[in-house]
């Protein structure tokens, strides 16, 4: 009942959650059909769909801060990648003796670097529950510290965007270094299993797809709960008239800080689900270009609707897969064209197509 | 020697570091019947003195009009009172106990000073009702905001204010779709919700029709008594209407007070005539 209240007036959200529920039931069933059946979904496609869903969750987290708080973050890929790295570390520890060098504890790249023991920050990551906590905590903590510094000193607008960009760029450079202990530019890869299930197994891939769909649904409901509360209204107030909100007694920096931190945590979960499905995490995930692309997904989908961000991420990433297999050279031009066309003809994005005269917030 | 003393101080078991004390905002004290003290304020931007040794006192419950040519420092003065600008010298006290210069904008707003901007500033994407809702004086901690629920009493208060500002028909409209004059009224309504002790109103009738001006004047007059109201305005007719015979009018010029008195006194003041007519 409470959950229904969250999406009662949110047509797009109802459709999104309905589609997710259908996907959670139908995709595993269709995947289980014999391969020659007309409706069979290959396991490869299931993993691809799962990847799209994690990217949609990432787009959702960006829409929460950009759409509702007006913070144009160009560094959200950093939180995504940090969540991914924590998951990657857990998966590395699961390899055990099956690595190329067969060391019982050290991942291959550490053996290769002649290290004789695990760095302290790798301890405990062989436990899934501990990794699960860090997946939320590490991005959240970084966002909290970064936000506390940036918002307290009232950095906003394009300056803030540039700093977020610098943040992810700095992290990328740091993670490229072998001495950091995160596998340098090769990153973490060659994973074997998760929670004891082989990552190559069909069932695991389907399971990860279902987990991604559930995470997206939960992320949507949590974001929706924030947006629908009075805090959501204060967010919009801060976005549109920051000084007015201040003179009404709102501590604008605290509002920004908490919502930004929540958003970073969601991005971290998205990254953690992304890594086992693509099988690798490397410093390129921190690249500033990636973070800018997320903003494009949200803009194409429609800002400040939440479901628009999801639609945009799915649409652009499907287009990316299609173009990079069929017409690889055309992809970047196509992305540019989509962005320009949407800006010109659909200023409210894909979501604008479905949106009738509802009281837009 | 001094290090040893420092060590002793730290070891003292009864010691509480000053930053551990919760900053309890002092309560407003207007026992001297003066609500706002501005003394010896000066502030300059890049060498230009926007405020120059300004002294101004506002009594509790008073309605004060402030006039002055462009660049006289009216808006800067409001910026200082509301914490947006910090002065170079001088002091600003709210009642006997609250030092405004040590507080930031949200703290000052919560202490009971409301401000209306020159350009009507409302939350354009929220409904008229939500604009008023957010202006209610309530706990402003993030988690309290997240879990806040509207009580029946608060809802009644919103309806009451909607009635006063004449926007009952537009309750669910987006504030951005209101006319200029309606936005001005909505912003005044937001201040009413806030129930401030001191209301700073910057050019409230800019862009209003004559009828709307009269209604605004009535409203501001009715507010004085319970609230102190400071109105900065260019429109002389409006100021004359507001000030009536016995209210005080202050003339600012080049960042300090040029004249103070009733409207008649001020209008016949030689210095004021010089400044306004450029004799």
Image: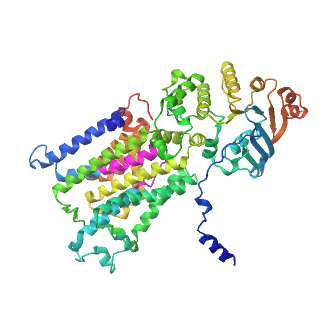
Colouring used for the render:
rainbow
* Rendered residue at 81%/42% (across/down): B256
Which quarter of the figure is the N terminus of chain B placed in? Answer: bottom right
Whether residue A312 is visible here, answered yes or no, is: no
Q: Is residue B243 left or right of residue B191?
A: right
Whether residue B106 is in magenta: the answer is no
Where is residue A227 shown, x and y percent of the image? Answer: 42, 40
Give above or below for A188 relative to A13. Answer: below
Whether residue A57 is in magenta: the answer is yes
In the current view of this chain or complex, which residue is farthest to the top? B211
Q: Nearer the viewer, residue B14 or A46?
A: B14
Give above or below for B24 relative to A354. Answer: below
Q: Give the range drawn in magenta.
A: A52-77
Where is residue B153 shown, x and y percent of the image? Answer: 51, 29
Give above or below for B225 relative to A300. Answer: above
* Rendered residue at 76%/43% (across/down): B37
Splitting the image into 4 quarters, where does residue B254 fall? top right
Splitting the image into 4 quarters, where does residue A111 fall? bottom left
What's the magenta bit mostly, secondary-structure-wise? helix
Where is residue B68 shown, x and y percent of the image? Answer: 79, 35
């Amino acid at each position: 009942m409470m959950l229904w209240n969250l999406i009662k007036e949110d047509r797009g959200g109802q459709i999104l959650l309905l589609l997710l529920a259908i996907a959670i039931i139908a995709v595993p069933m269709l995947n289980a059909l014999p391969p020659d059946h007309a409706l069979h979904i290959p396991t490869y496609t299931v993993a691809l769909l799962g990847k799209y869903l994690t990217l949609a969750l990432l787009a959702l987290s960006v829409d929460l801060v950009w759409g509702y708080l007006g913070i144009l973050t160009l560094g959200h890929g950093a939180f995504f990648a940090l969540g991914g790295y924590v998951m990657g570390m857990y998966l590395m520890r699961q390899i055990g003796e099956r690595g190329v060098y067969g060391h019982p504890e050290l991942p291959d790249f550490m053996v290769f670097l002649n290290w004789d023991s695990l760095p302290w920050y790798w301890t405990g990551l062989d436990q899934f529950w501990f990794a699960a906590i860090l997946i939320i905590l590490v991005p959240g903590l970084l966002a909290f510290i970064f936000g506390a510094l940036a918002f307290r000193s009232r950095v906003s607008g394009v300056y803030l965007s540039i700093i977020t960009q610098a943040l992810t760029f700095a992290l990328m450079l740091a993670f490229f270094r072998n001495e950091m202990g995160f596998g340098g530019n090769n990153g973490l890869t060659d994973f074997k299993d998760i929670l004891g299930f082989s990552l190559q197994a069909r069932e695991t891939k389907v399971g990860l797809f279902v987990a991604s769909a559930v995470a997206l649904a939960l992320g949507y409901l949590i974001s929706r709960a924030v947006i629908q509360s009075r805090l959501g209204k204060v967010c919009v107030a801060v976005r549109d008239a920051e000084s007015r909100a201040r003179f009404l007694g709102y501590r604008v920096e605290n509002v920004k800080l908490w919502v930004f931190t929540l958003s970073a945590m969601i991005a971290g979960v998205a990254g953690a689900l992304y890594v086992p499905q693509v099988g690798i995490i490397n410093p390129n995930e921190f690249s500033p270009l990636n973070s800018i692309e997320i903003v494009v997904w949200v803009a194409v989908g429609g800002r400040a609707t939440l479901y628009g961000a999801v639609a945009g991420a799915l649409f652009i990433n499907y287009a990316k897969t299609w173009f990079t297999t069929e017409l690889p050279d055309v992809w970047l031009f196509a992305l540019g064209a989509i962005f320009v066309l949407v800006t010109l003809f659909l200023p409210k994005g894909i979501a604008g197509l479905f949106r009738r005269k509802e009281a837009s917030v | 020697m001094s290090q040893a003393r420092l060590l002793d101080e730290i070891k003292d078991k009864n010691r509480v570091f000053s930053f551990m004390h919760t900053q309890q905002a002092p309560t407003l004290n207007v026992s001297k019947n003066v609500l706002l003290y501005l003394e010896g304020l000066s502030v300059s931007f890049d060498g230009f003195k926007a405020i120059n040794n300004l002294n101004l006192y506002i009594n509790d419950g008073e309605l004060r009009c402030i006039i002055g040519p462009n660049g006289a420092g009216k808006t800067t003065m409001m910026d200082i009172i509301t914490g947006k600008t910090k002065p170079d010298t001088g002091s600003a006290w709210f009642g006997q106990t609250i030092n405004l210069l040590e507080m930031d904008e949200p703290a000052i707003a919560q202490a009971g000073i409301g401000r209306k901007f020159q350009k009507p500033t409302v939350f354009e994407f929220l409904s008229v009702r939500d604009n008023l809702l957010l202006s209610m004086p309530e706990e402003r901690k993030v988690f309290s905001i997240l879990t806040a629920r509207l009580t029946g009493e608060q809802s009644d208060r919103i309806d009451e204010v909607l009635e006063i500002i004449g926007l009952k028909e537009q309750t669910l409209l987006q504030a951005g779709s209101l006319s200029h004059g309606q936005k001005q009224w909505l912003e005044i309504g937001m201040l009413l919700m806030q129930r401030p002790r001191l209301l700073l109103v910057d050019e409230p009738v800019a862009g209003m029709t004559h009828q709307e001006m009269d209604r605004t004047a009535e409203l501001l007059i009715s507010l004085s008594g319970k609230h102190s109201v400071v109105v900065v305005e260019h429109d002389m007719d409006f100021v004359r209407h507001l000030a009536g015979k016995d209210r005080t009018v202050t003339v600012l010029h080049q960042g300090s007070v040029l004249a103070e008195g009733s409207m008649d006194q001020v209008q016949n003041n030689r210095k004021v005539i010089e400044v306004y007519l450029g004799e």
